[in-house]
Amino acid sequence: MRSSEPEPGRSRALGEVETLAWLLDNSIPVPGTGGRRFGIDAIIGLVPVVGDVISGGIGLFVVWRGSRMGLPRVVVARMLANSALDLLIGSIPVIGDAFDLWFKANTRNLGLMRRHLERPETSTRNEWLVVGALIGIVLAIVLSIGWLLASVVNALVSAIG
């Protein structure tokens, strides 16, 4: 693994990512819950559509930093998938807000980053499995939508003709 940032720059960059992930995902304690926390991502996400786009854009900084530090491409792809999932599900009213409190994409991405920076020889098998499964799920959804649209068009044509 080759980094595009020298070692002192890598430490600073990792510190920035740690601070940003904490701010977005864990900076606000919830009293009486035994240490449960949430971050400003959940608050920003309360603003429909715009809030999720803004917090997703800020979260992409974490992914960008990881790619600049020389993480394997499949790890960066998994980080992007975490961010995309956070954005897509997070943008669903009410359900997405609850999901944001649980999923914490930035903290997950920070964990991936740390694991592969601290132990560069770490296998990327799990990342390949997750990315492959996500590709399969997306493909199944696209094919299902295509089949559904073709069925509707066929039913309409049959009804008209």
Image (cartoon, rainbow, N blue to C red):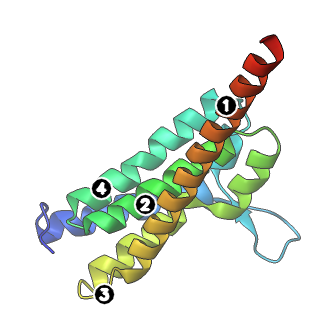
How many numbered dots are placed on residues in this image? 4
Q: Quadrant of residue 8?
A: bottom left
Q: Position of residue 144 (x, y in %)?
A: 64, 46
Mark 2 vs mark 3, CA separation in Å: 16 Å
Give the numbered dot on residue 149. 1
Q: Amino acid at mark 4?
A: Arg
Q: Secondary structure at mark 2?
A: helix
Give the numbered dot on residue 105. none
Q: Is residue 16 above or below residue 7?
A: above
Mark 1 surroundings within 10 Å by alpha-carbon count, few (fewer than 14), some (14 through 19), many (20 or more): few
Mark 2 vs mark 1, CA separation in Å: 32 Å
Q: Secondary structure at mark 1?
A: helix
Q: Are marks 4 and 2 in contact (CB under 8 Å)?
A: no
- Does residue 20 appear anywhere in the picture? no
Q: Amino acid at mark 2?
A: Met
Q: Position of residue 93 (x, y in %)?
A: 79, 38
Residue position marked by numbered label 3 in the rendering? 122
* Residue at horizontal 69 percent and vertical 53 percent from the top: 100
Q: Nearer the viewer, residue 54 or 151?
A: 151
Q: Earlier in the sequence, mark 3 or mark 1?
A: 3
Mark 3 surroundings within 10 Å by alpha-carbon count, few (fewer than 14), some (14 through 19), many (20 or more): few
Mark 4 vs mark 2, CA separation in Å: 11 Å
Q: Earlier in the sequence, mark 4 or mark 2?
A: 4
Residue position marked by numbered label 4 in the rendering? 65
* Residue at horizontal 65 percent and vertical 62 percent from the top: 103
Q: Position of residue 150 (x, y in %)?
A: 65, 31
Q: Earlier in the sequence, mark 2 or mark 3?
A: 2
Residue position marked by numbered label 2 in the rendering? 79
